[in-house]
Amino acid sequence: MRSKLLDAASRLFKERGLTGASISDIAAGADAFPSQITYYFRTKEALFVEAACRDMLYVARAAEQAALLAQSPQDYTRALVASVTASDSVAFFAEALTLTRRRQDLAPLVERTIARLHSEGLRAYVGQIERHGWRSLRDPDTTSRRFWAVAIGVAVEGYAMGRSAEELCAEMLRIIGEQADVRLRVVGDAHTKDEEGQS
């Protein structure tokens, strides 16, 4: 029943927002009674945050699966970004983040979700690096954390501007690509200076 309530809540919250989706509508969508929402989640806000956190973890798992067959770091990044930006779950999660600003009692769930995003992202990225023998310009933990920070930022701005999933994908790839290019240039400049110093 808990899972059914989360499924119905996720769908309705994404369509109507927190204020537009009533407890009775969510209960009806799950073939449940409104009292069951109170029993499992206490408040509509708690249900909203938990549904958004669960959706975010589902997106992360789907992105990881989509990137498994990548044969290059570029293909891996493209697969992750395309999968993450194809869904509105990141924007839904961003709404939950802002809600916890006023409801600090809900913050621990968000904190656990972010910690899990980072740990699962790190595990997947390290696995790909080891499997393919790729070389990372940054330590894998920083890379994984940066990916999700960029994803959330692009989603918030993109949805506010009415951008499509394709535009979100292009913007995220542009930002990640620019960050990688800057890092490559810095590394390249350092090598050039070292070589000049040795000559």
Image: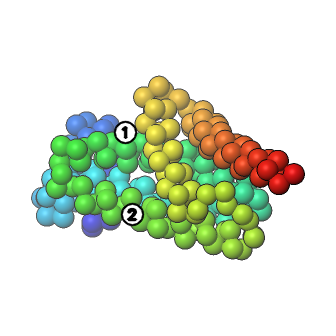
Residue 72, placed above or below residue 162: below
Q: Position of residue 96 (x, y in %)?
A: 31, 47
Residue drawn at point x = 53 percent, y = 58 percent: 142
- Camera-side mark, 1 or 2: 2
Q: Which mark identifies residue 15?
A: 1
Q: For residue 31, say whether it is visible.
A: no
Q: Is residue 103 above or below residue 36?
A: above
Q: Residue furthest top?
A: 161
Residue 185 appears at what percent x and percent y?
A: 72, 43
Residue closer to the observer: 55 or 155:
155
Q: CA distance from mark 1 to mark 2?
A: 27 Å
Residue 45 marker: none
**Residue at the (31%, 56%) spot, across then down:** 110
Q: Is residue 23 left or right of residue 90?
A: left
Residue at x 61% of width, y 54% of height: 80
Q: Sort mark 1 into few (<14), some (14-19) or many (20+) by Cα contacts within 10 Å.
A: few
Q: Earlier in the sequence, mark 1 or mark 2?
A: 1
The label shown at residue 115 is 2
Nearer the observer, 77 or 27: 77
Q: Amino acid at mark 2?
A: Ala
Q: Look at the image and tell me in which quarter the N terminus lies.
A: bottom left
